[in-house]
Image (cartoon, rainbow, N blue to C red):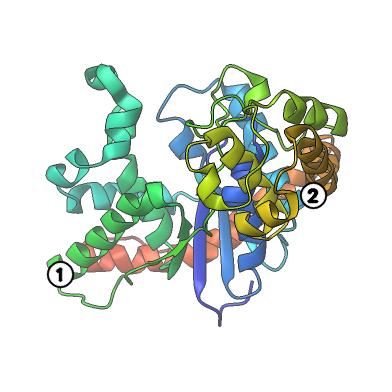
Amino acid sequence: MTTHKPLVFSGVQPTGNLHLGNYLGAIRNFVRLQQSYSCLYCVVDMHAITVWQEPAALRSATREVASAFIAAGVDPKAHIIFNQSQVPQHAELAWIFNCVARIGWLNRMTQFKDKAGSNREKASVGLYAYPNLMAADILAYRATHVPIGEDQTQHLELARDIAQKFNTDYSAPDFFPQPEALLQPEGARIMSLKDGSKKMSKSDPSDLSRINLNDDADMIAKKIRKARTDPEPLPATAEGLKERPEARNLVGIYAALSDTRAEDVLREFAGAEFSRFKGQLTDLCVEKLGPIGAEMKRLTADPAYVETVLADGAARARAIAQPILADVYDVVGFIRGPA
């Protein structure tokens, strides 16, 4: 991996059922960032176990995410693909950050409140403290940039706060950088095919609510055909989609997959019935996602290769993180034996 470019770190949880929202919201952008940055793309299996995971399913989902990175076009030789648990520096730095971050900071994390819900007292300590591990993920490599969605800005702000407090507490003003956000492009938020007010989610009980990356052409066609719409034809302007969440979602998907704006899509399809538009959307989805799904299936059938990619990536990630953690230990005051 080249080192003269700014360094990007990003991670995806291995919880199975990767879908169109994951691709448009993150993975496709990972591919594009390769041109301008040195990239570390992590399957964050340690984050995954903040809630219970069946071990065999976790291993399978970890390989699936790595396969999706490769199938979408991430180059595992030029950049680094690895799983978090193979690089112990993440956990080591997270403990130090547990001692740097303040309880009040974590109490303000809205995602913990959302995920724990009314069962806060039964949530794992890991679920509460995982923003500190997220900060360690980034800062273990002194990453300069992090691609995020708007719902993750609070976590990046916490990482910046932790970096600044560490630097201040230990009188090391330039030790950790202040990582910058690379906000996802507008329109990357993909909603459920059954309810335009909810994000497309792997946890939705209905498989018809999402297009999975490994769906074949027939399944994609079925899901788009059954996607919820309304009886009105497509409007000529984006203003006409304001109170039509399902129509807005399908137009947004078409725009994202075709690298255009919603306004351009509406200009082409103004007045069209959804039956015609859905046919065109199906063709576009199959064209863009079909090769990725086929390559994912090929890679899934070769788990040894995927695990080799992960092991090689982890070794290269450790080579970056180890000297940084050694410096952290020296700054903190830990006594370390010979390497």
Quadrant of the snapshot with the C terminus = bottom left
**Image location of residue 82, percent across then percent down:** 60, 51
Q: Residues within 10 Å of mark 1 (few under 14, many from 20)?
A: few
For residue 132, the mark is none
Residue on which the image places disc 1: 168
Residue on which the image places disc 2: 288
Q: Residues within 10 Å of mark 2 (few under 14, many from 20)?
A: few
Between residue 89 and residue 139, name the one nearer to us: 139
At horizontal 53% and vertical 60% (from top left) the residue drawn is: 185
Image depth: mark 2 or mark 1 in front: 2
At horizontal 75% and vertical 41% (from top left) the residue drawn is: 272
Q: Is 265 placed left or right of 243 in the picture?
A: right
Secondary structure beneath dot 1 equals helix
Q: Is residue 331 above or below residue 251?
A: below
Is residue 108 visible in this depiction of the protein?
yes
Secondary structure beneath dot 2 equals helix
**Image location of residue 236, percent across then percent down:** 63, 51
Q: Is residue 259 above or below residue 253?
A: below
Which quadrant would residue 117 be assigned to in this image?
A: top left
Marker count (numbered): 2
Marked residue nearer the N-terminal end (2 or 1): 1
Q: Is residue 57 above or below residue 191?
A: above
Q: Is 253 placed left or right of 105 in the picture?
A: right
Q: Amino acid at mark 1?
A: Thr
Which quadrant would residue 161 be assigned to in this image?
A: bottom left
User: Could you tell me how far apart the alpha carbons at marks 2 and 1 are, in whole angstroms?
Assistant: 48 Å
Between residue 218 and residue 329, name the one nearer to us: 218
Quadrant of the snapshot with the N terminus = bottom right
At horizontal 27% and vertical 17% (from top left) the residue drawn is: 119
Between residue 259 and residue 219, name the one nearer to us: 259
